[in-house]
Image: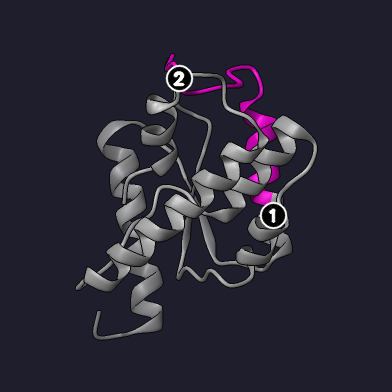
Amino acid sequence: MPEYSREYLRELNRSYGYDDILSIAKGQFEDEERMAAQATGLLFCDTDFIVNKIWCIDKFGKCHSWILDMIGQQHYDLYLLCNTDLPWEPDPLRENPEDRERLFGLYKTELEERKLPYAIIGGTGKERLENAIRVINVHYKTLNPKF
């Protein structure tokens, strides 16, 4: 499931604002609902309402109540929290190159406070992918031994 904000921000002919994050969250949710209805196996989502919340608060010092309300209604089996061990890659839509550790900490704290299942994924290249696959396999075998 692609990150809706990339498409939204590429088409925006101005700097994004507070209300744009709400529009992004709603667009992501609609796309995810559509994809979940069609999925026949695992569905991987690049982002969620927690990301929208942290982004909104970090950028604007506040967050839309709709996003905050939706966090409790959205359920994922497992979060893969990507470590900051990869070098920063410039991208016109990516912000905060010097702030990665702090933001990583915010995501980790949010997951822990909400008692959500997560694993930190590190490594480079194929190793990183293999680490993610291993974590997913262990998680799903624990939930469903037939997986």
Q: Is residue 38 visible?
A: yes
Query: Tag 2's secondary structure?
Result: loop
Label 1 and label 2: CA atoms lie apart by 32 Å
Which residue occupies the foreground of this view, 60 or 47? 60
Q: Identify the residue at horizontal 61%, vertical 21% (top origin).
A: 96
> In which quadrant will I find the C terminus?
bottom left
Q: List x then y, in percent, for residue 146.
A: 24, 85
Q: Which mark is residue 80?
A: none
Query: Tag 1's secondary structure?
Result: helix
Q: List x then y, in percent, for residue 11.
A: 38, 27
As displayed, is residue 12 above or below residue 28? above
* Pointer 2 residue: 13
Q: Which mark is residue 110?
A: 1
How many callouts does the rendering have?
Answer: 2
Disc 1 or 2, which lies upstream in sequence?
2
Which residue occupies the foreground of this view, 46 or 6? 6
Q: Is residue 90 magenta?
A: yes
Residue 92 relative to residue 109: left or right:
left
Span colored in magenta: 89-108
Residue 147 relative to residue 20: left or right:
left
Q: Amino acid at mark 2?
A: Asn
As displayed, is residue 49 above or below residue 75? above
Q: List x then y, in percent, for residue 80.
A: 46, 53
Q: Residue furthest front?
A: 13
Which residue occupies the foreground of this view, 124 or 19? 19
Q: Identify the residue at horizontal 64%, vertical 17% (top origin).
A: 98
Q: List x then y, in percent, for residue 37.
A: 28, 73
Label 1 vs label 2, nearer the camera? 2
Q: Is residue 30 magenta?
A: no
